[in-house]
Image: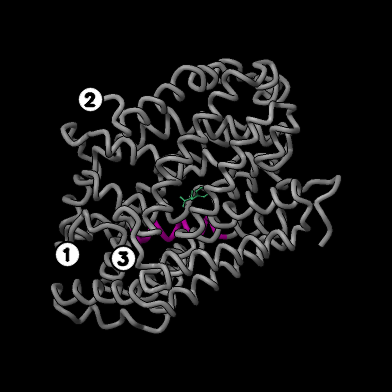
Amino acid sequence: MEKQGKKRETFSSGLAIFFATLGSAVGLGNIWKFPYLAGKNGGGAFVFLYLICVLLLGIPIAIGELYIGRKSRKNAVGAFKALKEKPFWSSIGYLGIVAAFLIMFFYSTVAGYVYSYVFKALTGSFANLKNQPTIVAVKTVGNQFDATVGSLMPPVFWQFVALLLVTIVLLAGVKKGIEKVTKTLMPILFILIIICDIRALTLPKASAGLSFLFDVHFSEINIKALVTALGLAFFKLSVGMGTMITYGSYFTKDNNLLGTSVKVALSDTLISLLAGIAIFPAVFQYGMEPAGGPGLLFKTIPLVFSQMPFGNILLLLFFMLTAIAATTAMISLVEVIVVFLNEEKGLTRTAAVLATTSSIFIVGALTVNPASLFGSIKLMGKSFFDIFDSISSNMLLPLGGLLIAIYVGYVAKKEDVTLELSNNGTLNNIALINIILFMLRYVSPFLLILVFLTSVGVIKI
Ligand code: PHE
């Protein structure tokens, strides 16, 4: 395939931009991470902190990134060169490339679990849960999950399949690949989550699940929960690591960047809440542990669905859609690296895609699965899975976000930012732009620094 030369691709319409960006935001973060982190960190209190992080940090920083991307029309590293900034700022892009790799190592592994659950659902592995007494069914799903995670072959095979699909879509390009896939699949995902919610909400103990998710007990708010909520907000909205710079570089000039960011952030948050609503009532209904950790999704969803009419079909569809959500998010993660290699290192797009996905597969498969070669190694008590996850979510993304806030708030010319975000004055949104700039200058950096210093123990509260 030819190099991306003079004519860079863009998405073809506002709707395509919305779905592609939402496709990046919505992923395992909503359906797997959000519920288990909310479960571990006290439910409502965590959800409250999360919403604050999305509003005060996630949205302004997403807008900052889209500004950089669309103005420069370049990859996350090249963007700063194109904007004629000092080389230091390109470090935002390099940090992003590292973060994209680290996230992909564990993300593609979990995506592999999801794919293997699609296969299990397809072959009827959950079919007789319905006939088992609840206690037995809870045990069965628990054992099934442990067996999946504890073995090498099915997960690695499915991880390969997932990465292969990502490769195919990325080889097809921006319009024919990313745009087409996200525009078709995102609406279906939404409908399926709603069906799942309807079932969850009609469970007798639904209200216990809902109060767990929405009742805010302020006593449960602590710094650890705040750091986690912050990391999740960045991870969720795909900000702080150049994905939004990269996707922004494909936005059309007439797109309203503020509007798109807000719509995507709110839709994404809605999907996380809908995933929580699908999962927690069932957790309480079946006496499971809300703080059950990363396995939560893989245990509760088979239980809930297996109890309802046509449950096995819906179960299949639900895991298929989770697989799709994971895949569209992975597409955006890998794209950051691919365009960098293509534009900065002179690889063809094809070579860049193949080199990236195959190295992710090799490292991910060897380090993240407990049953793989290096999977049982622990460094300072942490597995590779946890290390990749916490370094990226809790350090690299917030650090990237901090640098972006400082760059857009203080280094970029206000006039340039205002012109780009108002589409050369045609949008009449100067007041809103000023609010965003105010946040990027005075709110986001200080909140981020405060959270950092507190989490490393410099500030004690
Ligand atoms: N936002 C995606 C999710 O929630 C993950 C992601 C992170 C995608 C960073 C791109 C960049 O699953």
Q: Earlier in the sequence, mark 3 or mark 1?
A: 1
Residue at disc 1, CB closer than 8 Å to ligand 1 = no
Q: Within the magenta stretch, is there residue 140?
A: no
Residue at disc 2, CB closer than 8 Å to ligand 1 = no
Q: Tell us which disc is closer to us: 1 or 2.
A: 2
Vertical side of 126 occupied by 13: above or below: above
Q: Residues within 10 Å of mark 1 (few under 14, many from 20)?
A: some
**18 relative position to 231: left or right:** right
Mark 1 to mark 2 CA distance (whole Å): 38 Å
The secondary structure type at the circle numbered 3 is helix
Residue 106 horizontal/vertical position (percent): 45, 59
Residue 452 horizontal/vertical position (percent): 37, 31
The reply to whether discs 2 and 3 touch (Cβ–Cβ < 8 Å) is: no
Mark 3 to mark 1 CA distance (whole Å): 11 Å
Q: Which residue is mark 2?
A: 461
Pick whichever, 51 or 405, lies toward us.
Answer: 405
Name which residue type carries label 2: Ile
Q: Residue at x 24, y 37 (%)?
A: 45
Q: Which residue is mark 3?
A: 301
Query: Which image quadrant: the C terminus?
Result: top left
Mark 2 to mark 3 CA distance (whole Å): 38 Å
**454 relative position to 77: left or right:** left
Q: Which residues are magenta?
A: 185-196
Residue 51 horizontal/vertical position (percent): 36, 35
Q: Quadrant of residue 421?
A: top right
Q: Residues within 10 Å of mark 3 (few under 14, many from 20)?
A: many
Q: Earlier in the sequence, mark 1 or mark 2?
A: 1
Pick whichever, 348 or 191, lies toward us.
Answer: 348
**325 relative position to 217: left or right:** right
